[in-house]
Image (cartoon, rainbow, N blue to C red):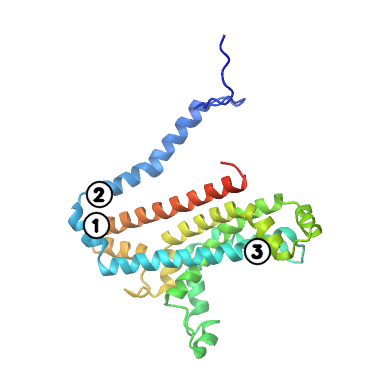
Amino acid sequence: MRAHSPTRWRFRRPSVIPGFGMALGLTLTWLTLLILIPLSGLAWRSSELGWEKFFAIAFDPRTLSALRISFGAAFAAACINVVFGVVLAWVLVRYRFPGKRIIDAMVDLPFALPTAVAGIALATLYAPNGWIGQFLTPLGIKIAFTPLGIVIALVFVGLPFVVRTVQPVMEEIDKEVEEAAATLGATRLQTIFRVLLPGLMPPALTGFALAFARGVGEYGSVIFIAGNLPFRSEIAPLLIVIKLEEYNYAAATGIAAMMLVISFAMLLIINLIQSWRRRRYGYGV
């Protein structure tokens, strides 16, 4: 008898837990109902426009401005969240201090807080006559009703994605690794950049992707602080709503299709970078 090669790839791997067929069927069913059918409907509705009308909507100056503001603010907020999210996760994992549980619980507040409430609260704080805005206005700093206000709102809603993605990985890193690096003569910066960060890059990129995706589609917390001025602080989701209210469904589906394509391309690039980092540093393929 011929022995089977242990390295041969199999679609179905042996498992002690039964029900692979049922689990796969339920997964594909829910994936089709919740994701594939809505996206297919959007693509089908957009295809009815024709290339000429689609490009006219896609390259309209107002559409390009809204897309630039949405993706630019989401990217900036995600970058900020990666830096401060990693620092916050490190503090929660490595240090003990009074009020730690309260801060840990407050990280999840954007998950539970309605986005409209968050937007109203941020507008109240950073408006020219707000609690914080009234001190910034004499300095010539205006946050509310500007793209800077959009970035702050997206930082608020996206921070938990980075913290909760990086925190479990940090908890698995033993302190002995840092102590071993110190005994071998590594400085603190060398320990951070050569010992700790390579292992934290995959979860940090995952948190970045989640925060970026949330920021691109965010609506409720942004419209109250953005000001919604065309060509200045109007985001793409708001422009889609405006087109729907005008019964211009063709323009709404065209803008939504543009957002879908750009978001998919950027998330694909992020996932490819993440996979490369994992293979590069040996954290799985």
Examine the rendered structure and indicate whether residue 11 appears above or below residue 249.
above
Cα–Cα span, label 1 and label 2: 9 Å
The disc placed on residue 45 is 2
- Asked if marks 1 and 2 touch (Cβ < 8 Å), the reply is yes
Q: Is residue 113 visible?
A: no
Cα–Cα span, label 3 and label 2: 44 Å
Q: Amino acid at mark 2?
A: Arg
Q: Amino acid at mark 3?
A: Leu
Examine the rendered structure and indicate whether residue 6 appears above or below residue 123.
above
Earlier residue among tags 1 and 2: 2
Q: Amino acid at mark 1?
A: Tyr
Where's residue 68, x and y in %? 37, 67
Residue displayed at 18% across by 56% down: 52
Query: Position of 205 compared to 198: left or right?
Result: left
Position of the N terminus, as image quadrant, is: top right
Query: Which residue is disc 1 drawn over?
Result: 249
Where's residue 264, x and y in %? 40, 51
Query: Position of 90 compared to 3: left or right?
Result: right
Residue displayed at 54% across by 67% down: 80
Where's residue 168, x and y in %? 66, 51
Query: Position of 168 compared to 20: left or right?
Result: right
Q: Quadrant of residue 91?
A: bottom right
Q: Is residue 257 visible?
A: yes
Query: Which residue is disc 3 drawn over?
Result: 88
Disc 3 element = helix
Q: Which is closer to the viewer, label 1 or label 3?
A: 3
Q: Residue lying farthest bottom?
A: 138
Residue displayed at 57% across by 26% down: 7
Residue displayed at 64% across by 52% down: 199
Cα–Cα span, label 1 and label 3: 43 Å
